[in-house]
Amino acid sequence: MAVSYISQAVQHVEPAVSRAKFEKEIADFRALGQAYRRNGWFLLEASFPQALVAMAAPQLSPPALVCGVLVDYTNYDAEPPSVRLVNPFTAEPYLADELPTNLPRALEGQAVELPGMPGALQFQQAQSLMQAYGPKEIPFLCIAGVREYHLHPAHSGDTWELHRAAGAGRLVRLLEVIHTYGIAPIKSYGVNLVPQIGFEIPEPAK
Amino acid sequence: MSPGPNKIDLAIIVNGQPTMVEANVNAPLRTVVEKALQQTNTTGQGPDQWELRDASGVELPLDQKIKEFNFVAGVQLFLNLKAGVGG
């Protein structure tokens, strides 16, 4: 049975076509499943039109299960797939303020010269590849090859047809982007130590 | 059939789809990208829109000569479309 937590699209493309393309995605993934497992990618469920992949960070000790990725191939490849980050245990999509990673990507640094300061100050900004309309909304992967990107009015000039032949909606490509910006940069666990000093209040001298 | 001298077979995984590319070891790695895209009929985005990584996820410099990587024949390399604009 398909996991159907987020799919809003109605299948209008000949189902046999989308199903065949979906099954090729899954077969290609499974053919190299051992290599992807080394990356920390585990295909948990694949039932047309959705594939659920868990993404772990094997570089950590102990390794961490970071997130799940739910890819919906309804109407593929007349339309691009939908991509959401989900809780890997429940397959429920994360809200924007719950995301374990927002897939930050460094933008080119800007040099700013300030009067009276020698040299220029370098400013480094990051752009999030996960976008949402609000903190309590379900965010989406905002790159070409993803349904929500192409449906967004800001990207009406960058149509799916410009990216389809390059395989922009292929499962492994989408996972690779999430891995590159969300999983591989995790280098260690963050531990915050909060020292506490306990006082025993002495009795007043009698 | 084994490749000739100065040739090596590389298994290039293009967006998850494998293809075997015969490469000249004296050519830059970029030539492998172009050939792999051609063999898998992957079109629409130029070679500079792709990134090639080894099995451990390290991005490989495409202008370096193939022989300098000391690849073993049949090594798997992963070619994926970059994230591009977005966010």
Image (spheres, coloured by chain):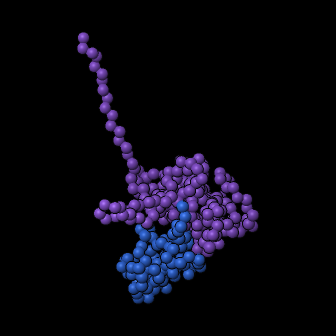
Q: Is residue B41 left or right of residue A179?
A: right
Residue in view at x 56 percent, y 76 percent: B45
Residue A107 lies, in percent from the top left, at: 45, 64
Please, which residue is most extreme toward the front here? Answer: A115
Residue in view at x 27 percent, y 15 percent: A204
Question: Which image quarter is the C terminus of chain A in?
Answer: top left
Frontmost residue, A170 versus A147: A147
Vertically, is A77 above or below B70?
above
Frontmost residue, A193 versus A86: A193
Residue A166 lies, in percent from the top left, at: 58, 74
- In the rendered picture, chain A carries what hue? purple
- In the rendered picture, chain B carries what hue? blue
Tell me where residue B4 sits by quadrant.
Answer: bottom left
Please, which residue is most extreme toward the bottom here? Answer: B5
Please, which residue is most extreme toward the top here? Answer: A206
Is residue A176 visible in this depiction of the protein?
yes
Frontmost residue, A106 versus B12: A106
Vertically, is A171 above or below A162?
above
